[in-house]
Amino acid sequence: MNNSTDRNTDSAQVGVSAVSRLFAVLHCLGDCDEGGERVTQLAQRVGLSQPTTHRLLRSLMDEGMVEQDLLSKRYRLSIEFFALAAKAGNTGNLRDVVRPSLLRLSASLGDSLFLLARSGFDAICLDRSEGPYPIRTFTGDIGGRVALGVGQGSLAILAFLPEDERETVIAYNLPRLKDFHLYDEVFLRSEVENVRRLGYAGRNTGALPGWPCRSWTAAAGQWQRSAWQLSPTAWGLIA
């Protein structure tokens, strides 16, 4: 009986290890540029042998989650993967509900708007509507993520979390925020209180100089325009 139990436990551990390796490969592919990555580089990044990495990639290809460019031989996430991710990103139909307003506001303001939602200790960009000017953001494109507290959109989400959740997130994220050379704890808490008092986040400082934005929370909407495009009247609107 004990031998049977031990074998079952060993099998379960092997299964968990295999799943962890699969997700490690997926995460690495998600961080690659659109051209994809060669198996040798992927193996180095995930810390596995090249044959093991190749087997994992073949398994993911069999499930339609990964594809290989026939010319470059590089691997990348497939359209099927993004279709699956899009369903997850639209939980509760949030993106479908918000998108008409996102497009309408972007057109009327002539600016870029972003829809962010909380995922654990991070904020993830679920959708965006491009204005006529190039915009830099902490999250990058749709699917990008940033620690809660970095950037005005995620700061707005952080500020309006229930107090116990907010304290947990601050304690966990503070070391991560310091990597951006932005915050110490006193400054972060001051920013959170300002957002709660005003009802939105909006400043012209941070790790992306000259790119102020005004953010409010539902999930979080974020309106952003570069500083050099703002007239005094416009500054008054977002201040």
Image (spheres, rainbow, N blue to C red):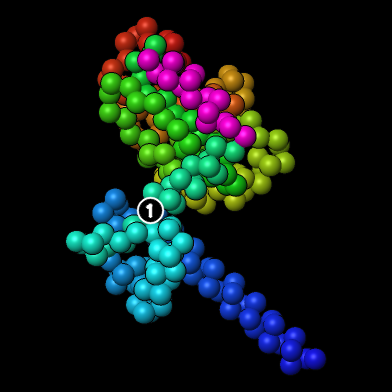
Secondary-structure class at tag 1? loop
Which range is magenta? 92-107
> Residue sitting at 41 percent across and 75 percent down?
55
Q: Main secondary structure of the magenta part?
A: helix
> Does 91 sit left or right of 181 as displayed?
right
Residue 42 can be seen in this image: yes
Judge the density around disc 1: few (<14), some (14-19), many (≥20) Cα neighbours within 10 Å.
some
Q: Nearer the viewer, residue 116 or 230?
A: 116
Which residue in the protein does label 1 denote?
78
Q: Is residue 238 above or below residue 58?
A: above
216 to 120, vertically: above or below? above
Question: In which quadrant of the rendered view does residue 109 lie?
Answer: top left
Nearer the observer, 50 or 236: 50
Residue found at the very far top of the displayed protein: 233
Residue depicted at 41% across the width and 30% down the height: 128
Q: Which residue type does callout 1 highlight?
A: Ser
Quadrant (top left/top right/bottom left/bottom right) for the N terminus = bottom right
Measuring 75% from the left and 86% from the top, which residue is drawn there? 5
In percent of width and height, residue 31 lies at: 37, 54
* 84 in magenta: no
